[in-house]
Image (tube, rainbow, N blue to C red):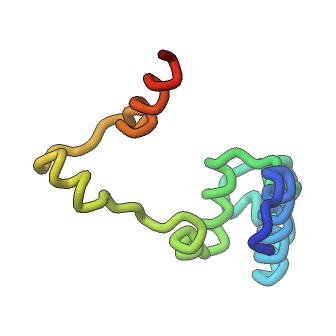
Amino acid sequence: MSKNKVSPHAIVLEIGSRFKTARLNANLSQQSLAKEAGISLKAVKNNELGKSTLLSAISVLVALNITDQLNFFLPAQSLSPIQLLKLQGKERQRASGRTKNQQSEQGEDQW
């Protein structure tokens, strides 16, 4: 997949294609993967078409024994040192939505 801006639709089609390739590399039929993953045959087919639910996609990853690939897809996120200082050991529960700079710029635009 290239680094150029691509549509979400193109991305899900590519992910579906990669699921299919992983299944074929494991030498599994859609039916046997569905049984192994504990999901329906239709869910496996939808997964390969890029129309999967997150739960069925994760079930397929587990069944194919490729959950380690999730670290490449979505690495674990950590808080920045500045955020840690602001929180003083507390766990962040929600996002503010805007930064102070964005709020002040919006306030200037209103007047």
Residue 94 horizontal side relative to residue 5, left or right:
left
Which residue is nearer to you in this view: 98 or 90?
Answer: 98
Is 31 rendered above or below residue 95?
below
Across and down, in percent, residue 34 comes to 76, 58
Q: Quadrant of residue 35?
A: bottom right
Across and down, in percent, residue 76 comes to 42, 65
In this figure, what is the number of numbered marks?
0
Residue 28 horizontal side relative to residue 65, left or right:
right
Is 81 rendered above or below residue 22?
above
Most extreme residue toward the front, as rendered? 111
Most extreme residue toward the left, as rendered? 88
Across and down, in percent, residue 51 comes to 82, 47
Residue 71 horizontal side relative to residue 4, left or right:
left
Is 96 rendered above or below residue 90?
above
Residue 31 horizontal side relative to residue 76, left or right:
right
Can see residue 41?
Answer: no
Can see residue 102?
Answer: yes
**Residue depicted at 51% across the width and 17% down the height:** 110
Which residue is nearer to you in this view: 1 or 108?
Answer: 108
**Residue depicted at 51% across the width and 71% down the height:** 71
Q: Quadrant of residue 107?
A: top left
Across and down, in percent, residue 1 comes to 80, 73
**Residue depicted at 68% across the width and 56% down the height:** 57
Which residue is nearer to you in this view: 83 or 78?
Answer: 83
**Residue depicted at 61% across the width and 75% down the height:** 66
